[in-house]
Amino acid sequence: MMSNTKEIYLTETGLNELKKELEVLKLEKRPAVIEALKEARALGDLSENAEYDAARNEQALVEGRIVEIEKLLEKAVILEKVATDRVSIGNDVTIKYVEDGEAEQYSIVGSTEADPFSNKISNESPIAKAIMNAKVGDVVTVESPAGSYQVEIMEIA
């Protein structure tokens, strides 16, 4: 269960994606599920009606996601373009792993928008926690489940 006080950090893009998803759920999916329920009811005996059960399950999923998105939007804190002197949520950060010299760029986003496959990491992840408030040139230690390692902040955008 989500805490009532926890703020949800979203970029403008993330906010727009959630609004778009909510619109699709309310204007397309919800009416389609209601129609499927009507059609399944018309088939008769609801006790052994697989179509009716499937439509009810779909309805529960759609309604649950609508409520979830509405709660996220209520608690959303929109990240404006942030300063680039120190790492914070909303920054794109290039780091170099001290051990092997490999560089990576990450976008620091709220947990709702995190997508490791797109290099969008949550502000609650071990690496983001470690580099938060660091400046270009700082070397910080990241404590991760696999052990600790050091990264150097190369660029903040």
Image: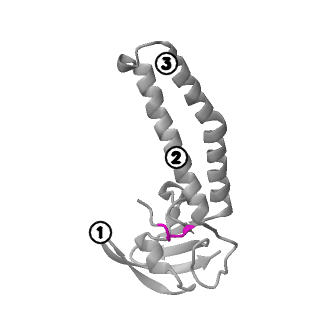
Does 7 lie within the magenta span?
Answer: yes
Marks 2 & 1, CB-CB < 8 Å contact? no
Image height of 29 relative to 69, above or below: above
In front: label 2 or label 1: 2
Q: Which residue is mark 2?
A: 65
Image height of 72 relative to 155, above or below: above
Does residue 26 appear to the left or right of 39 in the view shown? right
Give the distance between the C-alpha atoms of the residues marked 2 and 1, in whole angstroms.
Answer: 34 Å
Looking at the picture, tell me which residue is in the foreground, 58 or 96: 58
Main secondary-structure element of the magenta-colored stretch:
loop
Mark 1: which secondary structure?
Answer: loop
In front: label 3 or label 2: 3
Point out the tag, 2 or 1, that comes first from the N-terminus.
2
Residue 55 percent across, percent down from the top left: 48, 27
Residue 98 percent across, percent down from the top left: 42, 78
On the question of residue 101 being in view, the answer is no
Q: Give the residue drawn at x 52%, y 24%.
A: 37
Point out the tag, 3 or 1, that comes first from the N-terminus.
3
Q: Which residue is mark 1?
A: 146
Viewport quadrant of the C terminus: bottom right
Residue 78 percent across, percent down from the top left: 65, 68
Q: Which residue is mark 3?
A: 41
The amino acid type found where label 3 is placed reads Arg
